[in-house]
Image (tube, rainbow, N blue to C red):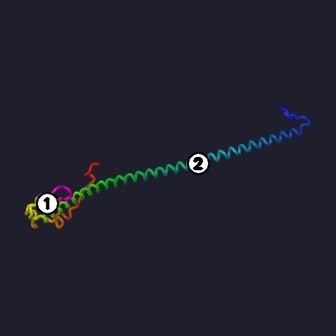
């Protein structure tokens, strides 16, 4: 058996072999643990590096998405402005169309009741057209709105600055 002084007794050669094999197992286990710890650190570092690459990729993707959102928002605002102008133009055209229909209805009624002096026709529920005097129904006095060259080519203009939101 080994003592603290390093002196062994004569019948302890088997005990020395056991101690040396135990020491050898301890040394191998320690070496194996060191290798395992080294591999663990390497896996951890690789995982950390992979996460850093993923963070960089996600930040890049996030910036691209934000840029796309900004561009889409700008396009939306532009289209909303155009829609407002188009709605105003549509309202103006509808008003003109209604006025023209009333004029046509009044002319038709006046042609039907030309010399009768009777109350005129109902034009779109807006009321009753009053008595049409003779000079207004003569062909020379009433302007034909469809054949007028003065107003045929007038553009309808509306701008975004005209309307309040």
Label ID, residue 120? 1
Residue 142, quarter of picture: bottom left
Where the N terminus falls, by quadrant? top right
Q: Is residue 109 above or below residue 15?
A: below
Numbered marks: total: 2
What x and y, as percent, mark residue 115? 8, 64
The main secondary structure of the magenta stretch is loop
Residue 22, quarter of picture: top right
Q: Is residue 165 magenta?
A: no
User: Judging from the image, what secondary structure is the residue with disc 1 in?
Assistant: loop
Which segment is the magenta one?
122-130
Q: Is residue 66 left or right of residue 81?
A: right
Label ID, residue 156? none
Q: Nearer the viewer, residue 139 or 106?
A: 106
What x and y, as percent, mark residue 124? 21, 58
Q: Residue furthest top?
A: 4
Residue 87, quarter of picture: bottom left
């Amino acid at each position: 058996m080994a003592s603290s002084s390093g002196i062994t007794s004569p019948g302890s050669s088997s005990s020395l072999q056991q101690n040396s094999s135990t020491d050898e197992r301890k040394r191998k286990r320690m070496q194996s643990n060191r290798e395992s710890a080294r591999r663990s650190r390497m896996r951890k570092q690789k995982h950390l590096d992979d996460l850093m690459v993923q963070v960089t990729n996600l930040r890049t993707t996030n910036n691209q998405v934000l840029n796309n959102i900004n561009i889409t928002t700008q396009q939306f605002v532009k289209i909303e402005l155009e829609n407002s102008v188009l709605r105003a133009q549509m309202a103006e055209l509808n008003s003109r169309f209604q006025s023209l229909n009333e004029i046509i209805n009044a002319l038709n009624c006046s042609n039907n009741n030309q010399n009768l002096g009777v109350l005129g026709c109902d034009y779109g529920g807006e009321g009753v057209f009053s008595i049409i005097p003779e000079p207004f129904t003569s062909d020379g006095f009433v302007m034909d709105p469809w054949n007028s060259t003065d107003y045929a080519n007038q553009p309808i203009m509306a701008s975004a600055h005209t309307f309040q939101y």
